[in-house]
Image (cartoon, grey):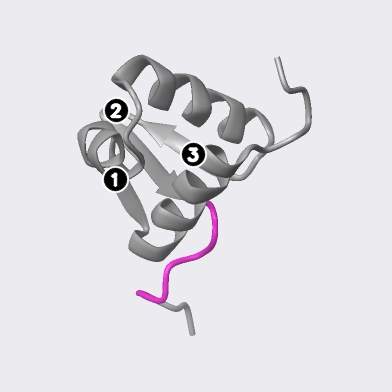
Amino acid sequence: MSGMLIDERQMEILNIVNQRGFAKVGDLVNLVYASPATIRRDLATLESLGMIVKVRGGASSVSPSSGEQSV
């Protein structure tokens, strides 16, 4: 395993998830040309580093959305 290193594919996945706020495994498969198993493994790695949150069927960004704000 790569330990704390993030490879180019994982960096691309992270960028996609952060840009969209959410990305499905199927979309990531097509966007980064990797198998579903590889995508899931990368998502698990990124989640363990606190960079994304895995949700059923994909991943969500950790950064707060620009949606609702409390007053």
Residue 42 badge:
none
Residue under label 3: 53
Q: Residue at x 77, y 23 (%)?
A: 3
Above or below: residue 45 compared with residue 19 = above
**Callout 3, which amino acid?**
Val
Splitting the image into 4 quarters, where does residue 29 fall? top left
Residue drawn at x 37%, y 15% is 37
**Magenta-colored stretch includes residue 44:** no
| Number of numbered discs overlaid on the protein picture | 3
Q: Which residue is mark 2?
A: 56
| Mark closer to the chain start, 1 or 2 | 1
Could you tell me if the residues under marks 3 and 1 are in contact, i.e. CB atoms within 8 Å?
no
Amino acid type, label 1: Leu
Task: Tell me the quarter of the image containing the N terminus.
Answer: top right
Relative image position of residue 55 (x, y in whole percent): 36, 32
Find the distance from the CA under tag 3 to the CA under tag 1.
Answer: 19 Å
Between the C-alphas of marks 1 and 2, the distance is 19 Å
- Left/right of residue 27 with respect to residue 46 in the rendered view: left
Residue situated in front as seen by the camera: 71 or 67: 67
* Residue sitting at x 21%, y 33%: 26
For mark 1, does the 10 Å Cα neighbourhood hold few (<14), some (14 to 19), or many (20 or more) residues? Answer: few
Residue that mark 1 sits on: 31
Query: Type of residue at label 2?
Result: Arg
Percent of width and height locating residue 51 = 61, 45
